Amino acid sequence: MKYSIVTFGCRVNQADSLRLEEQLRARGGEETRSGDADLVVVNTCSVTATADQGARQTIRRVARENPEARIFATGCYATRCEEELAALPNVVRVVRNDEKLAFLDKWLDEEARAGAAIENDGPCGKPIEPGVAGRTAFTIRAQTGCEEACAFCVIPKTRGASRSLTIEALVADVRRVAEAGFKEIAIAGVHLGSFGRDLAPRASLLQLLRGLEAIECDVSYRISSLEPMDCTPAIVDLVGASGRFLPHFHLPLQHGSDRLLRAMRRPYTLDRYRRLVDTIRTRLPHASIGTDVIAGFPGETEADFAATAQYLAASPLTHLHVFPYSDRPGTEATRMSGKVPAAIVRERGAQLRRTGAELAARFLASQAGTVRPGLTLEDGTLVVTDNYLKVRIGAGLPRNVRVRVRIGTSNAGGSAVVEQPGA
């Protein structure tokens, strides 16, 4: 059985795809390109109209290149618009998010009972390991669902209420992944900061992080996206004091205008966000700090946009994810007046992306000459450092090797020299 998994969107989707990958490999599945696969899973995102379009285009391309492929569509777009995806060529099933991690085993069992199982040519029980599907780090989903009410976001409707795994289950999962050889794990969630609020007894993200830190294994952790109100001083202190949690934060701002933050139903002000980022920069001078921003939210004036642009340009942030505003049916923002013309949205988005490129270049230049721990990726010539720089080194090492690298000077771009392999 040859399979291919195509993943769109967030780290939670990436974690879900890794679980599906493990299920298929356990049954002897062999990963291949979508054009050669018997079974193709398209794990969709629906955060923007562009994400929806990308999923549709991918499904049509796979069906055109591989007419015999059986395509399963899952994820947020599949949950939101089941009929749209079911009508596309070669789609044999559309799977909602709440069924995503159970459907493959169930379907393969049904096929086997019907005597129509896809031919299994590979060895059974192949565990997932670094390098499978091009992944060197592993992503674990600690939590899914969201109960916030952001005016622009459809994800609470596609992921449902917040649901957390237990700390015990996550500790066991980390041990399993570490035994498979992974050295870096990202801890992800749709609303990660709400981790544990639904459990009995109630738990917290800080408790989870402390539990993971206590595991005796050769694994480093990245904390995935955290809402600003959930990034507490205790979490910042834990990252600063720990040798296990990497100095890398992603804190969605969404906008620099307090007026629009209120319209978006974001529960903080720019000043609160600014103080949080400044605190992290003081506590962890080498940390990477990324953010998400929306360009062209309904009602955004030139002054509103200038507030975002001015803050970002002067901030200690290191990278931006820029989202041109996209109407999502069923959200409050869809019904708002004052929609910004598409050409202006594109222009403002392009300006913010230029600012993001300048911030990334400035951060790289600030790290020139420093020595950072990192992990080799791909063919061993790419390293991701603890503070999320991706730099090139000379050949000679395989992937998944810990190194210490001296970051190249700013005019050398993303390059580095290995100071200590196997560190």
Image (spheres, helix red, strand yellow):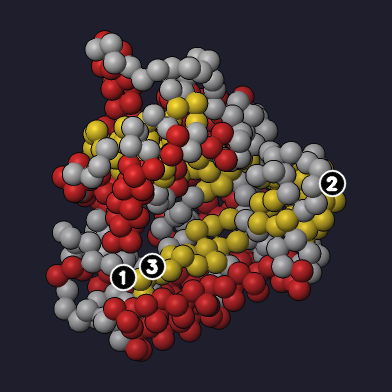
Q: Is residue 208 left or right of residue 161?
A: right
Label 1: which secondary element: loop
Judging by the rendered image, the residue that carries numbered circle 2 is 420
The image quarter containing residue 236 is: bottom right
Q: CA distance from mark 3 to mark 1?
A: 6 Å
The image quarter containing residue 36 is: top left
Give the x, y percent position of residue 248: 58, 55
Name the residue type under label 1.
Answer: Tyr
Closer-to-camera residue (348/396)? 396
Name the residue type under label 2.
Answer: Gln
Q: How many numbered marks are there? A: 3
Which residue is found at the position 68% from the left and 62% from the top? Answer: 286
The image quarter containing residue 46 is: bottom left
Label 3: which secondary element: strand
Which residue is found at the position 34% from the left and 44% from the top? Answer: 64
Please say if 118 is above or below 241.
above
Q: Nearer the viewer, mark 3 or mark 2?
A: 3
Marks 2 and 3: in contact by CB < 8 Å? no
Closer-to-camera residue (225/197)? 225
Is residue 64 visible in the rendered image? The answer is: yes
Which residue is found at the position 46% from the left and 23% from the top? Answer: 29
Name the residue type under label 3.
Answer: Phe
Judging by the rendered image, the residue that carries numbered circle 3 is 323
Is residue 178 visible in the rendered image? The answer is: no
Q: Is residue 69 left or right of residue 246?
A: left
Give the x, y percent position of residue 178: 60, 29
Judging by the rendered image, the residue that carries numbered circle 1 is 325
